[in-house]
Image (cartoon, rainbow, N blue to C red):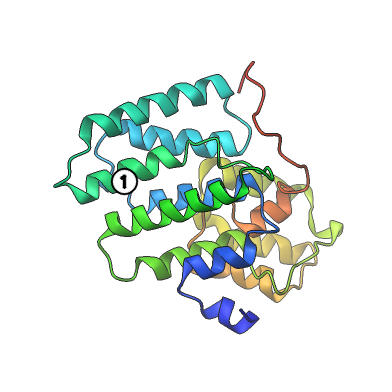
Amino acid sequence: MTEAEWLAATDPVAMLEIVQDGTSDRKLRLLACAACRRVWDAMGDERSQDAVVAAERFADGSLPAAVFDEVRNAVVEAYHEHSRPSNEVANAVMLAACIVTLDSLMPSKDVAPSYLLDVLDVLRCTAVAAQRPGEPAAQADLFREIFGNPFRPVTPDPAWLTSTVTALSRQMYVDRAFDRMPILADALQDAGCDNDDVLSHCRGAGPHVRGCWVLDWVLREEQTPRTRRPPADGP
């Protein structure tokens, strides 16, 4: 795949092949969660929504492993309660919610093939649940949102990461206030940022989700390797 093909791609499977070697467990889980959020209203059992929220927190290291295990057990139970051969949408969303809680969505040489397959399963399940012909293209937009342009990585100038920029980014991330992305662009520009890729991404229509490459870039979320499971003694 070339840079031009990446920027125009509508096939999330092909895009996963491009990023799989350099990505992290966190990015993959947040991608899967973002795909689930696109079919949020189809998740009729609140345990499936709880699973997605918990998976996001777990990806960011803010949910104890023991609590995550409980959430996983609950959503698997919900899947078995509601699974019906005749209800394709319900089956798909519940299965997707189960998959985002799997431990196989973790980086390790022995499980890498399985966690990549799990992400693909989430993408397929949510595409079925969405019942929209353009859903794979929308998922491709999520890849560009989370991974940016792998053919043109951006190295931030420390001078751009002012206290205003980092505080705004952190609050946006916590609150899911992604409508403030244009404000972040202004703050970055005031700090001297002149990178067109960064500024245009912030001012673009999105989608913007947790795992956004610009927010991660500002907050340096991907600079510290993640362990397989966060501590179980507190959020």
To which residue does mark 1 refer?
Answer: 93
- At horizontal 40% and vertical 24% (from top left) the residue drawn is 73
Q: Nearer the viewer, residue 29 or 158?
A: 29
Residue 69 lies left or right of residue 188; in this view the side is left
Q: Position of residue 194 (x, y in %)?
A: 76, 73
**In which quadrant is the N terminus drawn?**
bottom right
Q: Nearer the viewer, residue 178 or 14?
A: 14
Looking at the image, residue 147 lies above or below residue 164? below
Q: Position of residue 28 (x, y in %)?
A: 57, 50
Looking at the image, residue 74 lies above or below residue 31? above
In the displayed image of the protein, which residue is found farthest to the left? 86
Q: Is residue 210 visible?
A: no
- At horizontal 80% and vertical 59% (from top left) the residue drawn is 160
Q: Secondary structure at mark 1?
A: helix
In the image, what residue type sits under mark 1?
Answer: Val
Q: Position of residue 101 (x, y in %)?
A: 47, 36
Q: Nearer the viewer, residue 134 or 83?
A: 83
Residue 4 lies left or right of residue 32; in this view the side is right
